[in-house]
Amino acid sequence: MRKGMFTFFGGLVLSALLSFGAMAQQAEIEETINSQFDAFRADDFAAALEFATPNLQRYFQTPENFRSMVSNGYPMVQNPAEVRFLDRRADGSRFYQVVQVVDPKGFTHLLGYLMEQTDAGWRIGGVQILDAPGANV
């Protein structure tokens, strides 16, 4: 009976630790994305680029190149009126985080963020505009 109780409580502890780890990971991912939004709001594209993976940093090379891409392809992230974190799913060591952004004009956009763990923490490896059924895009 004692062995069974130990296994039961050990399982509860392990489950709690895994759950805490997942919550901490989620918080770190959201902090990275929110920090990039803050940099966009401050019109600081050099800081915003720091939240990208090293591969993306090499691809864009300069904050000006990054600004051009964001302004032309993702203007909704530059000064969002509202940001909500929705679904997240794992793909090996990477995560896909769905983010709902309401732009300053009130239009809703769904974005899929590819998040990758790096030596510097979680970084953004790409962003994709997702279809938003029922959204006013």
Image (spheres, grey):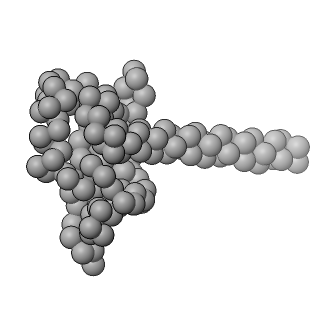
How many tags in the picture?
Answer: 0
| Residue 94 in view here | no
Tell which residue pokes out farthest to the top in this image: 119
Q: Nearer the viewer, residue 13 or 26?
A: 26
Residue located at (27% from left, 74% from top): 135
Residue 22 is left or right of residue 99, and the answer is: right
Tell which residue pokes out farthest to the front in this image: 42
Residue located at (29% from left, 34% from top): 44
**Is the residue 111 above or below the residue 9 in the image?**
below
Residue located at (24% from left, 47% from top): 127
Q: Quadrant of residue 136?
A: bottom left
Residue 44 is left or right of residue 19, and the answer is: left
Residue 59 is left or right of residue 43, and the answer is: left
Q: Where residue 106 sits: x, y (%)? A: 30, 69
Tell which residue pokes out farthest to the right in this image: 2
**Is the residue 69 above or below the residue 120 in the image?**
below
| Residue 21 in view here | yes
Tell which residue pokes out farthest to the bottom in this image: 134
Q: Where residue 79 sits: x, y (%)? A: 31, 52
Residue located at (88% from left, 43% from top): 2
Q: Where residue 98 sits: x, y (%)? A: 35, 56
Q: Quadrant of residue 120?
A: top left
Q: Where residue 16 sits: x, y (%)? A: 67, 45
Quadrant in which the C terminus appears: bottom left
